[in-house]
Image (spheres, rainbow, N blue to C red):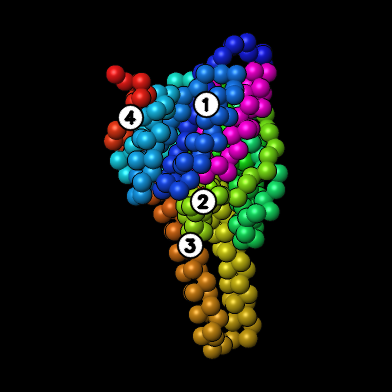
Amino acid sequence: MTARDHARPLLSVVVPCHNEEAMLPQFFREVIPALQALDADWEMLCVDDGSRDATLQRLLEQARGEPRLQVIKLSRNFGKEAAMSAGLDLSAGQVAVVLDADLQDPPELIAPMLAKWREGFDVVYAVRRSRDDDSLARRIGAHAFYRVFNRLTTEAERIPADTGDFRLLDRRVVERLRELPERTRFMKGLFAWLGFSSAAIPYDRPPRARGHSAWSYWKLWNFALDGLTSFSTMPLRVWTYVGLSVSLLSFVYATFLVLRTLIHGVDLPGYASLMVVILFLGGIQLISLGVIGEYLGRVFVEVKQRPLYLVEQVYQFSTPDNARP
Ligand code: UDP
Ligand code: MG
């Protein structure tokens, strides 16, 4: 790790936006001064991820007066992970930062992140000091997810708890990330997989000021499933062991039944125990089939090799409107 001596690196700020019309004016009011104050040149790439409100108009209004702002309109809603990929793919800076549009990722943190990058770290991620603002269910869910995920994955792929997508990346990390071919972009996991020297910066995550989170519990659950199934095959393998244990138990029980019949003669077999065994095994088979289906579905998505996102249009205005003749 060697310190970097770029006097003024180009910083690319990637902002995924989905239905953020209420948030954007305040976002730009706070972020642009924070960027101006940096010891770096910057460009901003706002990705309109299929918003159904006036997000695109808000972005374009801003872009007309700010040539460093690019607006990338995706053809529909592809999800935050794809929107981030779109922004990173089109970014040009030696450093990139992914920032939420709702100001939950404080822009003041970019300066210390950049300082860490100058020290030589390739990835600088922000870690939440506490999750006190989250609902109890969300906190328990997040905790359970990190536990399960980090149990099932290898040492190297472990994701640090309570990190979001708010992080700074060196150009070479961005390039390696772009080379990863998978369609299911579980970014936190991918970052962990990539490795590189990383540093953490603790911060307090403020609550969302306006608008609302696009993450319902159902979406979070599916996100967790995506994460687990794209990084671990344990759920597939576990059925081998379940099957083995059930077979072993049935063998023991069968031996007992045979011996009992030999010793005590024919007995009227119990309907209840038979029913329990049938239902139990039927249940196990359906669950394991479901797990196989889950993975098969992912293989299906991967082999189709559809693009991660479709860009409908990229807007960038070279000179501010008021400077035009
Ligand atoms: N977002 C997006 N596409 C989506 C959902 C969200 O680009 O389908 C953006 C959203 O505009 C915001 C960021 O991702 O900038 C984080 O979203 P949100 O605040 O809803 O998530 P949370 O902070 O609750 O995790
Ligand atoms: Mg948010």
Of callouts 1 and 4, the N-terminal one:
1
Q: Residues within 10 Å of mark 2 (few under 14, many from 20)?
A: some
User: Disc 2 to disc 3, how far (Cα)?
Assistant: 41 Å
Horizontal side of 132 relative to 195 (left or right) equals right
Q: Residue at x 57, y 59 (%)?
A: 242
Q: Secondary structure at mark 4?
A: strand
Query: Could you say which is closer to the camera, residue 142 or residue 272?
Result: 142
Q: Secondary structure at mark 1?
A: strand
- Per the image, the residue denoted by label 1 is 96
Q: Secondary structure at mark 2?
A: loop
Q: Secondary structure at mark 3?
A: helix
State the image coordinates of residue 50 (x, y, percent, origin top left): 35, 45
For discs 2 and 4, the disc positioned in front in the rendered view: 2
For discs 2 and 3, the disc positioned in front in the rendered view: 2
State the image coordinates of residue 2 (x, y, percent, origin top left): 67, 13
Q: What mark, if any, has residue 287 been given in the picture?
A: 3
- Per the image, the residue denoted by label 2 is 210
Range drawn in magenta? 94-121
Horizontal side of 132 relative to 241 (left or right) equals right
Q: What mark, if any, has residue 52 been given in the picture?
A: none
Is residue 24 on the magenta stretch? no
Query: Could you say which is closer to the camera, residue 139 or residue 252?
Result: 139
- Per the image, the residue denoted by label 4 is 315
Q: In this figure, what is the number of numbered marks?
A: 4
Disc 1 to disc 4: CB gap under 8 Å: no
Q: Is residue 134 visible?
A: yes
Amino acid marked by disc 1: Ala
Amino acid marked by disc 3: Ile
State the image coordinates of residue 252 (x, y, percent, origin top left): 62, 68
Is residue 120 on the magenta stretch? yes
Amino acid marked by disc 2: Arg
